[in-house]
Amino acid sequence: MGKLSGIKVVDLTQFLPGPMMTLMMADQGADVLKVEPPAGDPAREMAPFKDGQSVWFRNLNRGKRSMVLDLKSEAGRARLWQEIESADVFAEGFRPGVIARLGFGYEAVAARNPRLVYCSISAFGQQGALAHHPAHDMAVQALAGFLSVNNAPGGPPVVPGVPSADAAAGLTALSAVLMALIGRERTGRGDYLDIAMFDSLLPWCAHIAGEAIIGGAPPRSEGQRSLGGAAFYQVYGTKDGRHVALGGREEKFVVNLLTALGRPDLIPLGSARAGEQGVLFRFLRETFATRTRDEWVRWFADKDVAFAPVLDFREALDQPHVAERGLLKDGQIAPAVRFAGEDWSPRGAPELGQC
């Protein structure tokens, strides 16, 4: 039994944002019916595989049921209507207009089930100049301005390591669906949610793009303390070709590190404006280059400084902290939301058509 036990979700989404949202609901006990085309969700074919299933697919679809429906057929549409009539949530991720052409637009669905919370997830929303523009995560990041600062100071934008627009949309959709379900308790009616990856990501820029938000210049990495313009919020190379990170600009961290390194005279530079810390940058680059990454880990062990070695995913997942908090079990990342007194154990993802 989870917090969402008794909630039925009919999920037509694929890839990342929608499945991420419905995964978090399934992890809390919701009955998620994943409706797939005859060929299945393309994520099923994404390597690597464990026990015959895609690791990615399993981590996004565990605990769900699967039903194969051809929505272009009369029989497929009739069966979907049966499921919708008893559902609490309906999620779809088609390009704008597609689901309505299949006969399952919000007005039609709400007429059959007025208590249903209907969630559409797309790149740019159901209306607007970009609504029909094809895009996955990186294109959304590019058009939202985020890719322009995904670079080293002065360097070109690079492919982002994290699909932030996908993740933002999944989290936004979950929040919106839960709000709508709470609201339904008061009104007795469901709601329609137009969730866009672009809209979901854009609010995340407020801390770096303040000038642009009020009509001024866009941020540049070298001029932003949190984007590479501050010496104490930066990545440094080590003697063995690896890297370490300083991830805290508070004065106490600056004082603690520079005092330990014998350069208290540089402490005032820690609070200098971004782009005006060149001497401090040079000192830290030269200093970190004198030891290996792991030697620095040992050196920092008794220092109160926001320091971290840059780990690859193998190293990150092998950390004792991951095991102690039960964050990785049987090839699955544990849910970030785990309520006190409720145990979590890995569950398989459904085989295609396995209800």
Image: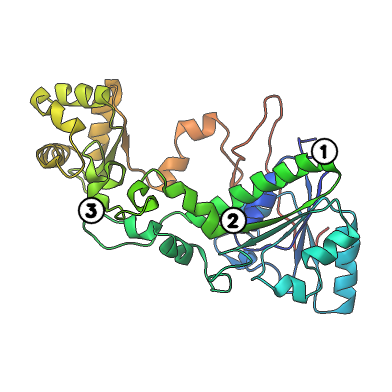
The answer to whether 158 appears left or right of 333 in the picture is: left
Q: Which residue is mark 1?
A: 186
How far across and how far down the image is residue 71, in percent? 80, 74
Q: Residues within 10 Å of mark 3 (few under 14, many from 20)?
A: some
Q: Nearer the viewer, mark 1 or mark 2?
A: 1
For the point 23% across and 33% down, the residue is 295
Q: Residues within 10 Å of mark 2 (few under 14, many from 20)?
A: many
| Structural distance between the alpha carbons of marks 1 and 2 | 40 Å
The answer to whether 154 appears left or right of 85 in the picture is: left
CB of mark 1 within 8 Å of CB of mark 2? no
| Structural distance between the alpha carbons of marks 2 and 3 | 35 Å
Residue type beneath disc 3: Pro
Q: Sequence order check: which comes first, mark 3 or mark 1?
A: 3
Name the quadrant of the C terminus: bottom right
Q: Which residue is mark 3?
A: 153
Circle 1 SS class: helix
